[in-house]
Image (cartoon, rainbow, N blue to C red):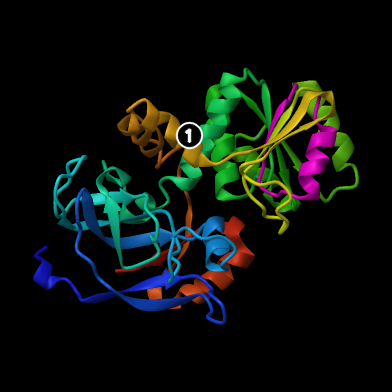
Amino acid sequence: MESDSLPQTYKAFVSKEGDLPRRLIEVPLNLPGDDQVLVKVSFAPLNQTDLVTSEGKQKISIRSPFLVGLESSGVIVAVGSNLKVPHKVGDKVHVHSKGSHAQYVLAYSQDVSEIKGDLSMEEAASHIINPATVAYMVSLAVRGGHKAVVNTAASSQLGKMLIRALKEKGIKSINTIRSDKYIEELKQEGADYVLNSESADFDTQLKDLAAKEEATIAFDAINGDFTDKLVSLSPANSTVHVYGSLGGVVKYRLIDEIKFDDNKTVSGLFYLTYIGEFKQRGELGKFYEEIHTPLKTTFRSEVHKIYPVDEILDAIAYYEKNSSKGKILIKYN
């Protein structure tokens, strides 16, 4: 696309700032510079990180207005000079770049990758945050020789993804939920055990199962007191990896590593650590292949609803109450 056919401004979703609410604003469109491409965004998913960012609780950009979003799908409409990874105008790509909740994104060449096969733009949007997190979790379970894993918030898209990925590796999963309505669904995904954390005998069940199956690793999306409960119910020499705060309390941060009695540990988990391992080895392409090839199978995300960009606040309100139903996508163009 020629630069003179591009708009002068575009809509971007930005976070709360002082007395200003999270909102859509018009921002100037800049052309790509050295090692950059300009992507016209098709779809961007809502993730828990987007909620935290949009509330102003953490920032992913260094100056106001503060951007929201880390992943999307789209089409390259302009390319800069000296691209380290070759791309051309018209390429359909996965985008892993700050500010993905916008109609256009300027990204470095290594932060976009070709959408391959018959993957739709909707399917391609949720391509890295959940898949890379699950791939990292599975790699930790395999490296540590763990026989079983405790998986909290198992009815989420990530939780289901983890069940499928562990099953492929022959590692058992003990999954926690808050409603019995998800039990059969998770068993169909391959869950070995499903426990309702609201049940009166939950603590006893989890402690006994973790001991029986030697579940010495747990992945916790809830945080706060629930993380403490997981630690207390885990066998000796266990690690609880915290990767979220669905319980509303951030007691353990993603950068923490805290030791407890019986050689138990709480350790933060962030998918960028896994990406960093591949970058250090010069194997970023291999990493993309690992997480993008199974996007229709093991790492698939069920799209529940799609909202137009102008209804993003309605989409967030719906997502906050219905995140377990499937992915909510925002259609930006």
Q: Residue at horizontal 28%, vertical 58%?
A: 106
Of the 4 image quadrants, the one containing the C terminus is: bottom left
Task: Decide if residue 118 is in sight here.
Answer: no
Between 24 and 155, the one nearer to me in the picture: 24
Number of residues whose C-alpha sits closer than 10 Å to that of mark 1, classed few (under 14), some (14–19) or many (20 or more): some
Q: Is residue 17 placed above or below 151 in the rendered structure?
A: below
Judge left or right: residue 322 versus residue 258: left
Determine the residue located farthest toward the bottom in the rendered image. Answer: 19
Image location of residue 54, percent across then percent down? 53, 67
Tell me which segment is drawn in magenta.
Answer: 214-235
Is residue 160 toward the left or the right of residue 101 in the image? Answer: right
Q: Name the residue rendered at 70%, 53% in the picture.
A: 250
Can you give x and y, in whole percent of width and height, for residue 204 in the image? 89, 36
| Horizontal relation, residue 117 to residue 127: left or right | left
Split into 4 quadrants, where in the image is the N terminus? Answer: bottom left
Vertical placement of residue 74 versus 292, above or below: below
Q: Residue at x 40, y 56 (%)?
A: 98
**Along the viewing direction, whichever of 146 and 260 lies nearer the viewer:** 260
Q: Residue furthest top?
A: 145
Do we see residue 154 in this rendering? yes
Confirm whether the magenta stretch covers residue 178: no
| Residue 8 image-quadrant placement | bottom left
The image shows residue 242, relative to residue 46, as above or below, that is above
The residue located at (44%, 61%) in the rendering is: 62
- 135 or 8, nearer to the observer: 8
Image position of 12 with respect to 281: above or below: below
Image check: 80 left or right of 64? left
Report the amino acid beneath label 1: Tyr
Look at the numbered disc 1 and give the secondary structure of its residue: helix
| Residue 115, position as x, y percentages in the image | 27, 45
Foreground pick, 62 / 203: 62
Q: Which residue is mark 1?
A: 274
